[in-house]
Image (spheres, rainbow, N blue to C red):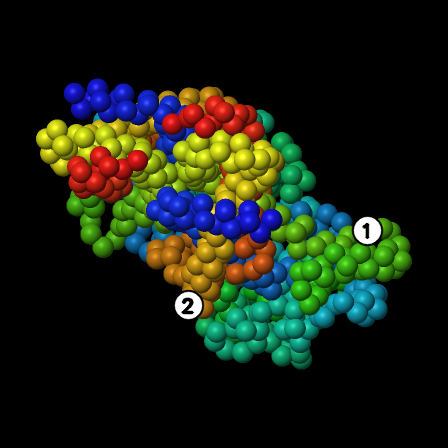
């Protein structure tokens, strides 16, 4: 009976109901849609970070991360490789790299870059570079002089496929090693800084140039699912000889991204709360009006023996229907806008340098987090009922005689 | 008119609870917007000023194409002539010249690729904050030759301290090998990791010798008294430089062109902020629309009587509109006051967003941020709320137009 009464009561004044429901609909839509956009931005940042030579877990020689110099290379890669093949779960992939700061120069230009020596076959399945070569060809395993550079770097150096590029860096003996490479491929990346920063050669070529022998700078691991990273990292730490290796997950490797993720978490919930407060005033006011214009009616109920608690329940039922209807429509609208944008995304190329500056991709795709959807709906429903308690209690307090005398 | 104001005022307080709730909704929205906009503008200000003071100055004279390629051969060949033009531009407070080269810098056991910059110590101190950023050791003196200032993170990586030697190896303007030995005189820290990890400063004269610059520089950096002067300086400087620039190879760039990333990210932040605020205000608008609607519908009978005794619909509408506008203004004014107070409190004490310092330092922002209360942030915030609320108030008032006295009086 409550349900029926509640339902009929909210349609006694359809205009009023529709107005407040619109507020709830827009509010819920804003929570879900903007929440998904923010998640889209942060997910893309994580994905960019992981595929830009990070992976889910990395193993370094102790101290390499703070001081990425050639002396901090892993001198016994076979120990790491043995540990990896023992620990890693099914489906996980890994590769080894040499990574040093170097100076690149050609006849016209010179500039600082990061030289990355990769195992072309295994690297392809792990980082972005496998699919990123847009001109020329990807590295082959036995390529001694081939180098892949980013489009932005090639433009800056006014060079192109087939031209020479000289790399200089410090070798293990402390001398300046230099070696000429020929550009065999040009890659594009999500971020221009990536294109400018990294150049790729085969790991063998890098080791030879730097007199590294078979030493490596890092092992990078990609799991099937990033959620398992902490557990696998712990296992690795146990197996590897303690003290000489650092095992870190992407959260530690990308502190900036982790910080942004945390900030977005806060920001999204703050947004939910602010939007709720905005509609909360309307909900209270509307229910209050609905209650006050029915003072006589409530007086009559009470005179007929209705208990105050029942009246509270009746009013809350009305507010419940209002909220649920608004939420259903708001969710539907939110999901519709998300799906409408799922294919094309929001293209912000016009502000690409600003996006780059903020560490974002050029196109934003909304991403649905179940956690956010549930939170948004719970915030609206529970807080909505909590604020409706005020008019409900008001209604329950009318004394029958006074209320019935009210005009 | 006065009777209408009196009527509107009394009508608002006929149902005080409802009016108060409505006013509170408007106060909440205004307060939030005033605070958030002040906060945003405050952080933009800090961001721009830090970047301008550390890196670009307000306006620069460069060779065309130097900004994008940073090619050592793209030079301002005769900085003296540019200086003469600058001296004729009264808006310019300070200016200096710089030259840059990517070089390998080695300490006894480390080598890094860095951006080596030649600066004129005395003039540089007036243009940039570099001198104040020196944390250990000393800033360069005018007569110094083989002395260098090193970024804190770079010093850490190179494992060098004051008095240690650095070997510099690069490519000169004429393509020759440029090599020199510098002594670390000071270590600076700007808080911006990229700069502290990647830059070494030395005196310009010696830089020009080592890199065979033949008296040329790469940037003539100019500082006016404030960002507002930039346009004027750029125009005057442009005219002056054209007269001395025979090959037409020099360009005048302002800080926005020198740091397009900052400008666009500010735009991005502002636009996304405004979208959120407008959505928020629309939710508030629908929240209060019911109050405005009810205030009219529950008084249909009363309006019927008023019209029957000769009140014109126009006058009635005016009185009702006045009622909504008064509510709106009370809300907005209280919102500005409370928002202003909250903002002012944080403007004095600063806000620390815990855990975000690493993120913020990338933007050249300090850990403690200060919102900047300004006419601009207050008027934009209050303006958005005002426009949307007034639009909300119009719809119910228009409904009155269709009232007929007889029908209205019989309405319940």
Relative depth, front residue between A45 and B370? B370
User: According to the image, label 1 marks what residue?
Assistant: B249
Going from N to C along the chain, the mark reached first, 1 or 2, is: 1
Relative depth, front residue between B380 and A297? A297
Q: Is residue A92 left or right of residue B122?
A: left
User: From mark 1 to mark 2, how far is it between C-alphas?
Assistant: 49 Å
Relative depth, front residue between A55 and B265? B265
Q: Is residue A114 visible?
A: no
User: According to the image, label 2 marks what residue?
Assistant: B349
Q: Is residue B98 left or right of residue B32?
A: right
Q: Is residue A283 left or right of residue A181?
A: left
Relative depth, front residue between B375 and B207? B375
Circle 2 — which element? helix
Q: Residue at point 44% right, 63% down?
A: B341
The quadrant in which residue A119 appears is: top left
Disc 2: which chain?
B
Q: Residue A264, how many percent across, how many down?
A: 38, 44
Extreme-front residue of the structure: B309
């Amino acid at each position: 009976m409550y349900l029926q009464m509640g339902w009929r009561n909210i349609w006694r004044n359809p205009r009023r109901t529709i107005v407040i429901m619109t507020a709830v609909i827009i509010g819920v839509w804003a929570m879900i849609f903007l929440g998904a956009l923010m998640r889209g931005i942060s997910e893309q940042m994580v994905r960019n970070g992981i595929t830009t030579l990070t992976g889910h877990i990395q193993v370094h020689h102790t101290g390499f991360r703070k001081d990425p110099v050639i002396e901090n290379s892993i001198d016994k890669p076979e120990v790491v490789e043995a540990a990896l093949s023992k620990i890693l779960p099914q489906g996980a992939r890994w590769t080894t790299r040499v990574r040093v700061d170097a100076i690149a120069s050609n006849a016209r230009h010179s500039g600082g870059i990061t030289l990355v020596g990769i195992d072309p076959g295994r690297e392809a399945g792990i980082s972005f570079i496998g699919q990123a070569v847009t001109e020329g060809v990807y590295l082959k395993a036995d390529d001694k002089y081939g180098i892949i550079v980013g489009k932005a770097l090639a433009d800056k150096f006014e060079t192109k496929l087939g031209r020479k590029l000289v790399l200089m860096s410090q070798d293990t003996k402390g001398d300046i090693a230099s070696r000429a490479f020929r550009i065999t491929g040009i890659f594009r990346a999500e971020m221009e800084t990536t294109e400018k920063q990294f150049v790729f050669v085969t790991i063998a070529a890098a080791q030879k140039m730097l007199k590294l022998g078979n030493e490596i700078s890092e092992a990078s691991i990609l799991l099937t699912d990033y959620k398992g990273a902490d557990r696998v990292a712990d296992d690795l730490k146990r197996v590897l000889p303690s003290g000489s290796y650092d095992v870190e997950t992407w959260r530690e490797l990308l502190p900036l991204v982790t910080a942004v993720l945390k900030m977005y978490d806060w920001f999204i919930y703050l947004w939910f709360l602010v939007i709720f407060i905005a509609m909360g005033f309307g909900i209270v006011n509307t229910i209050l009006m609905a209650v006050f214009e029915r003072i006589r009616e409530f007086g009559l109920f009470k005179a007929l023996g209705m208990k105050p608690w029942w009246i509270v329940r009746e009013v809350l039922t009305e507010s419940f229907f209002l909220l649920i209807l608004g939420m259903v429509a708001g969710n539907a609208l939110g999901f519709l806008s998300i799906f409408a944008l799922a294919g094309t995304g929001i293209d912000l190329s016009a502000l690409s340098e600003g996006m780059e500056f903020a560490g974002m991709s050029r196109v934003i795709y909304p991403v649905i987090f179940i956690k956010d959807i549930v939170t948004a709906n719970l915030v609206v429903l529970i807080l909505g009922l909590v604020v409706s308690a005020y008019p409900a209690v008001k209604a329950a307090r009318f004394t029958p005689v006074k209320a019935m005398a009210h005009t | 008119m006065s009777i209408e104001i009196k009527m509107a005022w009394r009508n608002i307080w006929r149902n005080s609870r409802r009016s108060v709730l409505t006013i509170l909704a408007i106060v909440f929205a205004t307060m939030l917007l005033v605070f958030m906009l002040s906060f945003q503008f405050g952080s933009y200000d800090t961001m721009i000023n830090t970047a301008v003071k550390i890196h670009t100055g307000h306006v620069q004279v460069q060779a065309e194409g130097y900004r994008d390629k940073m090619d050592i051969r793209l030079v301002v060949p005769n900085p003296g002539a540019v200086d003469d033009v600058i001296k004729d531009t009264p808006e310019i407070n300070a200016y200096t010249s710089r030259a840059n080269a990517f070089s390998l810098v080695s300490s006894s056991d480390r080598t890094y690729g860095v951006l080596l910059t030649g600066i004129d110590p005395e003039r540089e101190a007036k243009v940039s904050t570099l001198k104040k950023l020196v944390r250990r050791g000393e800033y360069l003196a005018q007569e110094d030759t083989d002395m260098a200032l090193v970024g804190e993170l770079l010093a850490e990586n190179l494992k060098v301290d004051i008095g240690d030697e650095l070997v510099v190896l690069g490519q000169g303007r004429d393509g020759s090998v440029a090599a020199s030995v510098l002594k670390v005189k000071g270590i600076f820290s700007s808080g911006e990791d990229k700069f502290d990890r990647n830059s070494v400063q030395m005196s310009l004269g010696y830089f020009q010798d080592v890199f065979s610059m033949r008296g040329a520089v790469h940037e003539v950096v100019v500082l006016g008294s404030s960002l507002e002067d930039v346009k004027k300086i750029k125009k005057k400087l442009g005219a002056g430089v054209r007269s001395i620039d025979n090959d037409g190879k020099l360009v005048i760039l302002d800080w926005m062109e020198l740091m397009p990333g900052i400008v666009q990210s500010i735009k991005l932040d502002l636009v996304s902020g405004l979208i959120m605020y407008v959505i928020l205000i629309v939710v508030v608008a629908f929240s209060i629309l019911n109050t405005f609607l009810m205030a009219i519908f529950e008084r249909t009978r009363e309006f019927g009587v008023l019209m029957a005794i000769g009140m014109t619909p126009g006058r009635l509408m005016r009185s009702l509109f006045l009622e909504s506008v008064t509510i709106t203004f009370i809300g907005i004014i209280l919102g500005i006051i409370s928002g202003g107070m909250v903002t002012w409190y944080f403007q004095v004490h600063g806000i620390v967003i815990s855990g975000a310092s690493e993120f913020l330092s990338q933007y050249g922002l300090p850990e403690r941020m200060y919102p900047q209360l300004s006419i601009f942030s207050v008027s934009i915030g209050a303006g958005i709320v005002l426009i949307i609320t007034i639009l909300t108030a119009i719809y119910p008032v228009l409904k009155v137009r269709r009232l007929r006295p007889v029908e209205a009086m019989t309405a319940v």
